[in-house]
Image (spheres, rainbow, N blue to C red):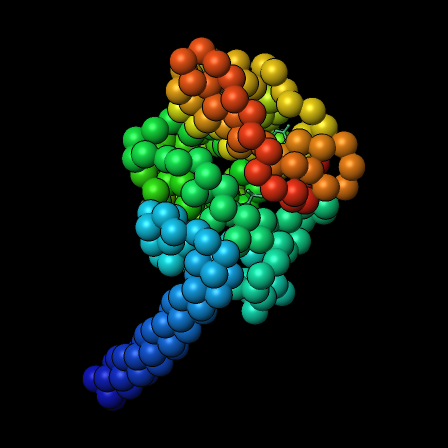
């Protein structure tokens, strides 16, 4: 009798596990093909060519960075809500900023506005050493857990607090990326760039901002307006 029971429970476990494996494989291959379509139709179609950016976006499952209610929209061409007044950026914006950073593996990148950690994950997968900072402690912890689960947290330092002030002890940085809209260019932050460094920041006083690229070349500061964009405010 005992033997039969054990056998039955063993059979049941094997059957459930096989079903789960098949379902997971289906989910993963579906999300992989949704990512391929996103990259082709939304990102390459708009001129993004950096192989490191495209490969990272192909590998990172964006659906893990959004809430269960938004999962079906994870690969659509839009920003999605992730909490009160906060959003995960549109995939194209993430790709655009990642390309415009002109990143080399191993470079030190300060990211202000961790949010869901999606942009952080892309930068980490691209080989950057990322210092990311987020005002909302809960968002920061959730982002850290996601990156841990994806095996991308090793090259990332997470901090909670005001990103315009809190990383002075680790400056200077090769790159600075701000993923919230600032009313004006924070000079203190520009001062954290190393010589030859580059910073991307959306700046503007209205509902939209201008994405600015600031480069320090041979002691000369070059400011280049890139494109109009719309981010939640840097506070
Ligand atoms: N890049 C994120 C989206 C960021 S949304 C992603 O991929 O999901 C902007 C984030 O900036 C919000 O989470 C907001 O809480 C944060 N933020 C706003 N002002 C900040 C500040 N001064 N310092 C740090 N984080 C800030």
* Residue depicted at x 46% and y 39%: 100
- Where the N terminus falls, by quadrant? bottom left
Image quarter for ligand 1 = top right
* Residue depicted at x 61% and y 58%: 78
Outermost residue toward the top?
219
Work out whether residue 170 can be spotted. Answer: no
Q: Position of residue 129 (x, y in %)?
A: 36, 31
The image quadrant that residue 203 belongs to is: top right
* Residue depicted at x 65% and y 44%: 229
Q: Nearer the viewer, residue 167 or 92?
A: 92
Outermost residue toward the left?
3
Q: Position of residue 157 (x, y in %)?
A: 42, 30
Q: Is residue 22 above or below residue 234?
A: below
* Residue depicted at x 44% and y 58%: 44
Outermost residue toward the right?
206
The image quadrant that residue 126 belongs to is: top left
- Where the C terminus falls, by quadrant? top right
Q: Is residue 219 above or below residue 39?
A: above
Left or right: 142 with respect to 18?
right
Q: Position of residue 16 (x, y in %)?
A: 35, 79
Left or right: 147 with respect to 137?
left
Q: Position of residue 71 (x, y in %)?
A: 56, 65
Q: Nearer the viewer, residue 111 or 53?
A: 53
Q: Is residue 107 above or below residue 123?
A: above
């Amino acid at each position: 009798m005992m033997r039969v029971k054990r056998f039955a429970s063993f059979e049941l476990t094997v059957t459930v596990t096989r079903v789960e494996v098949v379902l997971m494989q289906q989910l993963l291959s579906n999300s992989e093909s949704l990512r391929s379509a996103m990259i082709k139709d939304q990102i390459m179609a708009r001129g993004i060519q950096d192989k490191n950016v495209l490969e990272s976006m192909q590998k990172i499952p964006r659906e893990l960075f959004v809430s269960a209610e938004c999962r079906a929209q994870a690969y659509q061409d839009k920003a999605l809500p992730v909490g009160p007044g906060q959003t995960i950026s549109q995939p194209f914006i993430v790709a655009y900023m990642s390309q415009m950073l002109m990143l080399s593996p191993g470079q030190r990148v300060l990211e202000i506005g961790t949010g869901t950690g999606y942009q952080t994950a892309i930068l980490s997968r691209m080989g950057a050493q990322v210092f990311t900072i987020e005002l909302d402690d809960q968002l920061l912890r959730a982002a850290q857990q996601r990156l841990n689960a994806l095996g991308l947290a090793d090259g990332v330092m997470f901090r909670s607090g005001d990103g315009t002030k809190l990383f002075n002890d680790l400056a200077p940085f090769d790159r600075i990326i701000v993923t919230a809209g600032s009313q004006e260019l924070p000079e203190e932050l520009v001062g954290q760039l190393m010589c030859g460094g580059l910073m991307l920041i959306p700046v503007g006083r209205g509902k939209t901002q201008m994405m600015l690229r600031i480069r320090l070349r041979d002691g000369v500061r070059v400011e280049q307006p890139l494109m109009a964009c719309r981010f939640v405010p840097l506070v």
